[in-house]
Image: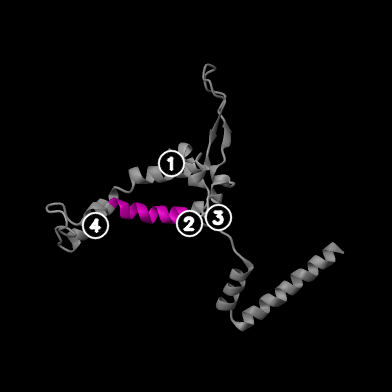
Amino acid sequence: MANILGRFQWLTCPRKDLSTGWLHCDPGPMFKPEYYCLPGWLPQWFPWKEISVLPVQWHALALGLFASIIAPFGGFFASGVKRAFNIKDFGDSIPGHGGITDRMDCQMVMAVFAYIYHQSFVVTQSFSIEMILDQILRNLSLEEQQILYMKFGEIFQERQFQEA
């Protein structure tokens, strides 16, 4: 499905306003195919010598594997919490089925994993000069800022001598 959905610009273009101009964009490297040559040990009658894969397909594979293998253990975790506190279920919204939390055990584990995965592997980290300066001013003492200033001066002087 990632291969099919990755071809529609209304799913891959970032939307910044309410106009329709956002439908025409460069979707970025996540939705551009990468080509892989298949190994030579495949039989000669096999019709393809290379395949194209969208990078988003690799991410979909990782999320799908986690969802099918690990996420169901969220129910076991919730069951352990209920046993530890001597609770039959987390609510009574559906008689005999527990609360909404009992229905969402796997989804909670999946949501945490999806967020961490997205922040770690999908989102490109970009730092602006303002962000870096803000971190320096917040986290370094005045003495450490002065040392940093002196080190930058030394680095810039070395670069000037190298260029000259």
Spatial CA distance of label 4 from label 2 is 25 Å
Asked if the residue at tag 3 contacts the one at tag 2, i.e. Cβ–Cβ closer than 8 Å, the answer is no
Can you say which quadrant of the picture contains the N terminus? top left
Query: Of helix, strand and loop, which one carries label 4?
Result: helix
Q: Which numbered circle lies on residue 124?
A: 3
- Residue 80 image position (x, y, % from top left): 22, 57
Kindly report the secondary structure that dominates the magenta region of the rendered protein: helix
Residue 119, numbered circle: 2
Q: Is residue 122 shown in magenta?
A: no
Task: Specify few, some or many for label 1: CA neighbours under 10 Å numbering under 14, 14-19, or 20 or more.
Answer: few
Question: Residue sitting at 56 percent across and 38 percent down?
Answer: 33
Mark earlier in primary sequence (4, 2):
4
Residue 157: percent from the left, percent from the top? 80, 71
Q: Is 49 or 146 nearer to us in this picture?
A: 49
Kindly identify the amino acid type of the residue bearing the numbered disc 1. Leu
First in sequence: mark 3 vs mark 4: 4
How many neighbours does mark 3 have within 10 angstroms: few (below 14), some (14-19), or many (20 or more)? few
The residue that appears at 52% across and 57% down in the rendered structure is 17
Query: Would you name the residue on which mark 1 appears?
Result: 61
Question: As drawn, which residue projects farthest toward the bottom?
Answer: 142
Q: Is residue 102 left or right of residue 65?
A: left
Over which residues does the magenta segment extend?
106-119
**Image point (22%, 56%), residue name:** 100
Kind of residue indicated by mark 2: Gln
Which numbered disc, 1 or 4, marks the residue closer to the eye? 4
- From mark 1 to mark 4, how far is it between C-alphas? 27 Å
Identify the residue under disc 4: 101
Gap between marks 1 and 2 measured at Cα: 17 Å
Disc 3 to disc 4, how far (Cα)? 33 Å
Relative vertical location of residue 84 with respect to residue 8 in this rendering, above or below: below
First reached walking from the N terminus: tag 2 or tag 3: 2
